[in-house]
Amino acid sequence: MSGLNWGIGDLLTVTKLAWDLYHNCYLVAREAPDDFRQLVNELASLQACLRNLRDDVNSDMSFFERLGENKKQTLERCLASCFETLNRLQKLVIKYRELGVGDGLQFWRKLKWVGKQGEIAELKSKIMVHTCNISLCMSSIGNSSLARIEASMIRALERQEATTSSQSPSQENEDEDEVDDLAPLQKAKTAPQAGSETQSNGLGLYGLRRAFTGATLVDNVSRMSPESTPSISEEDMSEFGTPHMAKDPPMRKRSASAKAMGKTRSRSDVSIDPGLKAFPPSPRASGESPRDMTKSPGGEYFKKPHSKRIPSSSKDLLHRSHGIGGKEPLNVDEAVASAMQALASARQKDQSARPLRVVGQDPLHKPHDALQARFQKLAEDELKIRKLNAKDWLRVATWWLLKARFNTRVDERTQYMSTRGSFSVSGEGKAAINQAYVDLLKASWILYTIVLTDDHKPSLMTDENRKLFYSLSDGISEDLGDFQPVDPPEKDTLLCQNYNIWELLQPEEETYDEENLLPALENGRWITVEQDDAGEEHEQVLFRTFVDAAIGGKRYRMRSKGAPYMLLLSTKEGESEPKVTLCNQSGTLSLTRDFTIEDLQNKDLPMSPFAGSGISPREAIPLNFGRMNITVAFTNEDDLRQFMYIPKAYFDAVKRREPRQLDKATETLLFKSSVEVFEQLKASTMKPMNPRQIFRSCDLRVLETTTKEGWRTTRRIVISSSAGETRPWCTELFLPLSRVQIRREGLARQCTIKWSDCTHEKFDKTDGNYNKIYTYVYDDSNPNIAFQLLFRNSQDATDFESTILHLSIPPIFSTPGPNPGFIYDISDTEPNPKKYKALILTKSRFDWTYSDLFYMYRDTDYQYDHSTFRVRLPSVYYTDYISTHVEKLYKPPPDEAPHFSHCEKRVGNAPIDFDDEAVAAGFMSSLSGGHTLIFSRRVHYITTKPPSRFGSTKSNKGNAEVQLWSKGNSVRLVSRWDDKVEDKWMSMSVPRDGLAHTKDTNRASLPKCEYDRGRKIDMAHLVARDSREKDEKTGKKAGSSMAGPITIAFESVRDREEFAAALEGKATPPTMQRSAFDDLMDL
């Protein structure tokens, strides 16, 4: 096929070839590596571009004549080169067709992919360049600019081909013979990619186009048959991902102005596999905003080639599109990025050249000369202070259109409706309807007298201004159409109304923000003709009205008239709470905060600034914004009721998230945050539900219920919907204090959490008559609830993790390291007042982190091994959570699922390992009542028998652990034998100078002293206690008190010397062996 003198038949041939290749490649692309999937994306874009070109040629027989000779030759070269590339790809497809295309995964397992990556990457780049060149030929770009861009992309392709050919043939053969044992996606990640394009910011070429234009280079496929078009669903697309799984920028909907511009040819959408990127409508077909099309993720993509010629004014825009620094694009990515920006600039230029659709001003509703003169005088006075552009004037006109609608709604329409349902503006009319008419005249005068002047017309060519202009023009025409005067309006009646174009500012309102005295975008986004268009893309306005307000303190506040402030209720994507906003016309005041439940409470306003003004106290409410004191007054009760109803309905629906008022317990809020995405998972597989349960802009709270017994503390987690939901919802779940597993992976603000509730069915018992007994229990080893949460920022995710893994009170001691431990002071007030310790032990299993919670009472038992820094607590307590369905002969009804009922205490065993002596000693010291552990060693024996002249004094109780504890100047000796000894604990007070020992021996002797024996040790006083006996005087548990000499046989002489040094106060306290490097490695 010749590269020149192309006809319609040749165009149809290459278009059909592109479609056939796309269809064939798509069938095997679902399980293909990423590079091949990107190739299919580029094929979809190319065949759509060729279809558009074919349709343009078919619909206009003079298409090539109007194209011009230079651009026609460029197009023919592009089509010829495109045909060669497609032929090369077709040969590759035919070569592997015999492998079968029925199962995509099977196909890619048979294909030796590693050796084909370079070739596929080269084809992908060429197809992308062909698509870009054809699109440029169809645009209004000049011939010289088109030639320069074409040459730039050709050189970029040549450099890529040179890089690809640098790979040695032997290496290619090795790659071909490589056994295909790896999964395709693994190969795509691990194999070298020769000649592949640079991934710009992780978006790839498709994402690069989306970043520049908000769409693909071409329109969607026209008139594509549904039968031949592959269709997919997005149910497999994950809402969460690791940082490299960046989502494409959201597409903007086609604006009303673009629809009004009128595109007569419709385009049908293309459906692509979830792994492939779906191709949205192009800017040419969907009316995309040129301003959005020129956004870029970074300036490094804008490179322009050096040019010795000085560009003419008609080429300045294109030259600027080549970037900063005058460097020619080095690779295909940069070349396409430069071409994309040039294409976007050309399309924006075409858009600006289109004339405005202007509807003439109705002569029946034109301000009379006196009123126009007043309007002109007010406008000129304002222009002496500041300069206003077309957008500023459009906002001012929109403000008065909204005020007109507000005054019309306020007025009692029934008194002024004619038989045709129109309003009368006669002199006998009420002030509100007459004021509404004057406000419409203000808006009309600004639109036709100021905005449509020659000075402001160029500014109206932007898409945003066009949209605002058309909406304003249509709104004024529609609203004035409702005013059909019965009698000619009296000039005096209109002049008696408020004809000011600018709302009056209060003193503190003028100085609220000294750096922002001009109309600001903060206000502008709220001032739109339609309420649905107000706010940013991530904001939704629920209610909007005009109010009076008193701003500031008593010395400066004023009682405004005529409702000069706009009051809004809105929601924001990613946040759940309703927001209240107060703004003025000029832009000097724009205040926003969350609307809270406290704002709904009835408040008496004896000092209301609107007292005596005829406004009911119920219609004047305080809405303070930080340091700015504001009282808002509604002009009618309907607005007040609606303003209060929206948040009240929401807070009533989510009232379970508020702390409950309980008789015998207290509930407090521990954690509160908005969650951008909340998804429920299957706890057994940690996979999404089917169908997926995804909710956005939710509120997450953790509440804690404490009773008079500290160990009975429980929690609940409450998740509620956004205030913007049509039907707000709220769900609460039982949350234990321990064994809740949490994982931080992927995004820094992402958390995955799972735990167990009290709904595990257990029926291992019978009643003796072969009837099963059903019990529902709490099983911490088998989680059945799982969530995935995406917070607004990483700090919220970290705070949530800390709330889950720790107690709500400050710890008295904590251990360092990746799995820290914490000790807390807990107390019971009833029925038996006591104080004890709570131990939180953080643990990790695989990539999950959780914590164990134990309670340790005063009289306890422990083992401390100094040689391994290991502490074992054989009889600590933990909390078991009991359900409402225990040992019953029937299962619970379906509508009455079992849930948490109460807590019970269980005995457990807790081993704890430490890294160094200082941390272990600090941990043990925090468990005592003010004592400090200064010495601990394993000894051969300790005996209380006096020395025998003829026999051995060795004890038959075996080895023991001997410890010294100090508190001030006193020292207590505590020892524990192994578990085979019943009264294993012994304690005594020893003087610092009472040690009698012989030099160079491992034995140390203490003179006759009193000691206590018992089964447990009182950690508050370090006294051995016997749990079986109670002191007759105090009624407390006491041990057996005896007296006698003490002999200790250490394992070494060094241990005996260290014991003596510790007793005499000469020993050096242990220090932490961890370094800053260890802490860094933990992080």
Image (cartoon, helix red, strand yellow):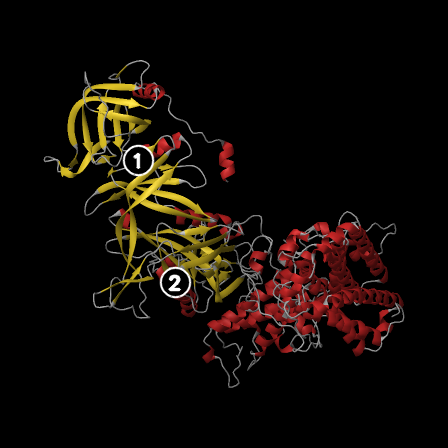
Asked if one can make out residue 358 in the rendered structure from this viewpoint, the answer is no
Position of 726 compared to 927: left or right? right
**Secondary structure state at the residue bearing disc 2:** strand
Q: Is residue 665 above or below residue 407?
A: above
Question: Residue 738: x, y in percent?
Answer: 36, 49
Q: Earlier in the sequence, mark 1 or mark 2?
A: 2
Question: Residue 128: x, y in percent?
Answer: 75, 61
Residue type at the position of mark 2: Thr
- Of residues 116 and 952, the one nearer the viewer is 952
Question: Residue 179: x, y in percent?
Answer: 67, 56
* Residue 1062, image quadrant: top left
- Tell me if label 1 and label 2 are in contact, CB under 8 Å: no
Position of 650 compared to 185: left or right? left
Q: Residue furthest bottom?
A: 419
Circle 2 packing at 10 Å, graded few (<14), some (14-19), many (20+), is: few
- In the rendered image, which residue does mark 2 sit on? 731
Whole-number angstrom distance, CA of label 1 to CA of label 2: 45 Å
Residue type at the position of mark 1: Gln
- In the rendered image, which residue does mark 1 sit on? 863
Image point 83% across, 61% down: which residue? Answer: 146
* Residue 971, image quadrant: top left
Q: Is residue 828 above or below residue 928?
A: below
Image point 38% across, 40% down: which residue? Answer: 821
Image point 46% across, 56% down: which residue? Answer: 674
Q: Residue furthest top?
A: 999
- Of residues 272 and 701, the one nearer the viewer is 272
